[in-house]
Image (cartoon, grey):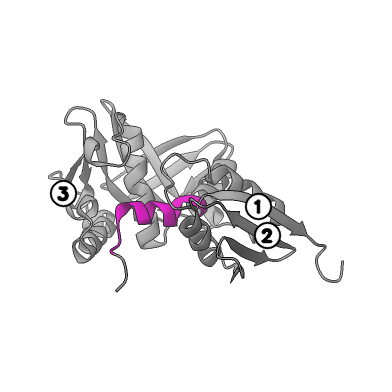
Amino acid sequence: MPEPLTLANLLDDAAILSLEHQLHLEEVLGEHDWSVDLREQRFEFTGSRTITCTRFHLLGTAAPGPDSWLWAWANPSGFPEALTALSATLRDFGQQYGIAELASAEVPFGALPGSPAEPHFAAAILTEAAKAVTGRWSAYNGDAGGGTRAAFLIEHPDFQLPPPEPARLMRVLQQALTLPLLTDHRRAVHSYAVRRGLGVVPGQDADQLTLAGPGFEALVEFDPLGRVAKISATLSAPRGA
């Protein structure tokens, strides 16, 4: 019988691919301002150029007063259904798998991993889980006034990742493995490789995993506690170079 799915599992599943997307988003946006009109359903970044998101989804808000997260589907403000429908999908997923943090209308900060004190961090945790469930990987967490943070999943062609590139992937892997909420390194690495379209080959030794992509192969070794102990990458020139 498979083990039950938990919020911690979703955070591990999301960790590495989410980090790569967020780093790419920062590169695309650079120095910028943002604005959103929920009634007109318009989300825009302005900076060296203007980027208007082709689609966006309001996940919810994290407020310092009650120290809690409120999912968009439960917000009494009555936002357009098109903006909150994805959050309702997460509610249904939470109900199906018994994940209270997704199924409950309001989630106290203290009920989240690490018991974050700041709205920014609480919003980030649930946004990570939302990415793993929905397969939408670009997010924006913005100031909604009064210390409240509003979290969105945003879509635009420029936010899509470029093809895997060996040196960049190794940097992302190494950086992601220092994330404080990562609990299962093996699950995180395997999930990233599958979702990124990389080859995944279990080693003869249960403590090894080989990842393969265009121009590289990486041997990931785990210690007895399941943490990544070493990543050995072999780079090769593209065929025909």
Whether tag 3 and tag 1 are in contact, CB under 8 A, the answer is no
Q: Mark 3 — residue?
A: 105
Secondary structure type for disc 3: loop
Whole-angstrom CA distance, mark 3 to mark 1, is: 41 Å
Secondary structure type for disc 1: strand
Residue, x 31% and y 66% (percent of image)?
A: 3
How many discs mark residues in the rendered view? Answer: 3
Counting from the top left corner in percent of width and height, residue 100 is at 19, 53
Q: Would you say residue 53 is visible in this rendering? A: no
Foreground: disc 2 or disc 3: 2
Secondary structure type for disc 2: strand
N-terminal-most mark, 3 or 1? 3
Counting from the top left corner in percent of width and height, residue 75 is at 16, 46
Whether tag 2 and tag 1 are in contact, CB under 8 A, the answer is yes
Q: Would you say residue 240 is visible in this rendering? A: yes
Question: What's the amino acid at mark 1?
Answer: Ile
Whole-angstrom CA distance, mark 2 to mark 1, is: 7 Å
